Amino acid sequence: MSIPAPNLDDLRFQRDLVDEARKRIIHYCPEWTEYNLSDPGITLIELFAWMTELIVYRLNKVPEKNYIKFMELLGMQLQPASSARTDLTFWLSVSLPISPENDSPVIVPQGTQVISQSVDEEDVTFTTDRQLTIVPPKLTQLRRQDEFHKNYLPRLGVEEFYAFNREEPQVGDTFYLGFDESHPINGHILQIEFECQQVQAVGVKRDDPPWVWECAMGNDIWQELTPSTFPDEKDTTGGLNNENGSITLYLPLNLKPDQIFGRYGYWVRCRLEPRRPEQGMYTESPRVVNVSAYTLGATVPATHAVVVENEFLGTSSGDPGQMFN
């Protein structure tokens, strides 16, 4: 990729060179009072302006090789050529866990090749940089910020869980979903299914509820998550007002377990925060009857390269500088 060249030829003969030089006469030579074109001094100014314009024009034609040398004189170095890198997402044909009794992971080996198919251009091959282990998420905690000491997950079905403030939902009300750290879900596609008590006239726009989803990144840092809008992954919870619904979140690759109020694990939270007037505001809190989590797939780093194994390159003599084709 060539270096973007700046336009150095931006000085105009009359405006930027001649006129600017004439303005400086009174400062550097106050006894010079004749500025007519017939004055020999003005003639010299125009001559030097013309020569300067030629030099700037030639400087603007400096080849890229010279730019590189100039940067090297300033201590700057070009980065060496490298392969393109990207993140590859693998979707499962069946979400995990397949059943409560079967929580086996799915493994995508390191070096798995993925090829883009193009009609007009050459196919591009990317190879996974590491092994991808897709595990079923293990949801262990369901907590609300104002009662964080209380884990509602084992109480569901016996005790109602109010997602936000029971009396009157307020901006900043938050509920948390905690996942077992022994099942790493960084880079996973997490689908959370809710079963709720259907509520009418809650005051919010069901297809755009006033909430924000976030995940803990470690060291008390939270990263906002945008719910998926793919056709099969759209938010169908209606702001937790539909009887059954799900929301799909793409977790970042650098997701880390964190300790929140003394509880350790992978954390995802939903925070009440209206950002647009049309979203409205809850007049009463949604009530969750049951919640479960599934994995739809995961993401892994990949490099535009092809791994060749067991290829005989030649025999080394031990001499430096040997090359093999």
Image (spheres, helix red, strand yellow):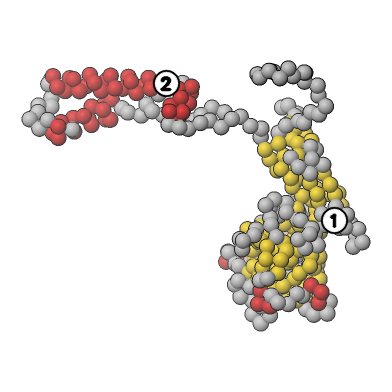
Quadrant in which the N terminus appears: top right
Q: How crowded is mark 2: few (under 14 residues within 10 Å), some or many (20 or more)?
A: few
Q: Is residue 192 visible?
A: no
Q: Which residue occupies the extreme left position in the image?
A: 31
Report the residue marked by disc 2: 61
Quarter occupied by residue 162: bottom right
Quarter occupied by residue 279: bottom right
Q: What residue type is labelled 2?
A: Lys
In the foreground, 324 or 81:
324
Which residue is drawn at the image coordinates 79% and 44% (left, top)?
Answer: 131
Q: Where is residue 304 in the image (x, y as percent from the top left)?
A: 71, 33
Quarter occupied by residue 201: bottom right
Q: Residues within 10 Å of mark 1 (few under 14, many from 20)?
A: many
How far separated are the C-alphas under marks 2 and 1?
61 Å
Marking on residue 96: 1
Q: Would you say the residues marked 2 and 1 are in contact, meaning their CB atoms lie under 8 Å apart?
A: no
